[in-house]
Image (cartoon, rainbow, N blue to C red):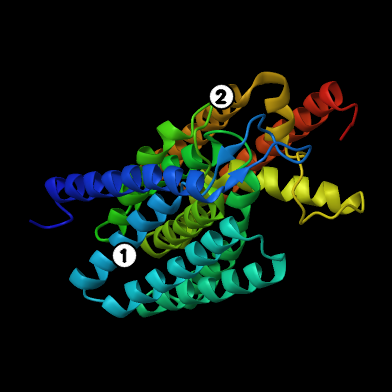
Amino acid sequence: MRWSEPAGLLAIGLLAWLVSWAGTRWAIRHAQVHGLHDLPSERRSHAVPTPRGGGIGIAAAGLAALLLLAATDDTPTAWLAMAMGLSLVAGIGWWDDHRDLPATPRLLVHVVAAALLAAGWWLHGAGPIVAVVAFLAAVFLVNAWNFMDGIDGLATSQAMLCGVAFAAMLPAPEGMVGVSLAAACLGFLPSNLPRARVFLGDVGSGTLGFLVAMLLAAGLSASGRAQWPVLLLPVLAMSVDVGLTLGWRMRRGERWWQAHVQHAYQRWSRRSGHGTVAFAYAIWTALACGFMLWWLGYGLPGALPALLAWVVAAVLAWRVLHREAGGRTEGIGA
């Protein structure tokens, strides 16, 4: 059975789902035994103590997929480099879930992991531009997914949609990573929907960001440069909320790297609830993914203006949500 065939992809998806599902349940028990709970506070968006570290199952599923590719593909060293990068991100996240670490060592590990991802794509035959983008995307998206993992279901559903979209456009074996990501998210998501029984933890959010960066680089490698701008659409909702919120906090002289509840999604969730916000973000990203696939399918020109139009819409939406939801709940304007 070839992994590129429908039966092979189905088998990979089922394996990733099972590993993630089992890992999530193990993580819940592990957190309860060792007292690993996120406690409610003014810098968090939940109301009851909740186990963390549930994303260990997603990390295990992603690592299994990369090791399988290393064992079966023509460029095993490339996949092993990427697997090492994922292991570093997941490992430092798991450590942080057990014992809070300063931001600096975590960021340094993320940089090393991003370099391994870039090296992996270079060994896989991608050009220098793709390798550089892979490095930058990994550093940014690993932390973006961590910043956006503040309400039930949001970070996981966003990564799942990215996995589906890139799996639909990528050839084998790269598409297998997208299938594994989407299936692993599906194995974890039922336990994270409102009200969540477990949180991703840094091990999970970092893993999601790293795998999405890997898929983005795969998309760049598989597409013509004229189409590259639309490949950013699946990560636009997360990127705009993170980028604008951090910029807003920097302008106010706040410690932007510390935990807070100033993201647009956090402000909105305090008024409308976690489920409504996560669903709305999912609808936005699903439309963005559908538009990307439609655009690539027809090979249309003018991808950059299309991306800019989506960016403008996302910025306007962020500004409205950040101002209106924040003003009604906290008396703070944007």
Label placed on residue 275: 2
Q: Can residue 165 be seen from the camera position used here? A: no
Q: Residue furthest left?
A: 1
In the rendered image, the vertical position of residue 40 relative to residue 272, given as above or below: below
In this orientation, which residue lies closer to the viewer: 164 or 311?
A: 164
Quadrant for the N terminus, please: bottom left
Q: Residue type at mark 2: give it.
A: Gly
Residue at 60% in and 26% down: 274
Mark 1, residue position: 66
Residue at 45% in and 39% down: 289
Residue 190 is left or right of residue 240, and the answer is left
Q: Can residue 12 be seen from the camera position used here? A: yes
Q: Residue furthest front?
A: 33
Residue 277: x and y, percent? 61, 27
Residue at 27% in and 76% down: 76
The local secondary structure at tag 1 comes to helix
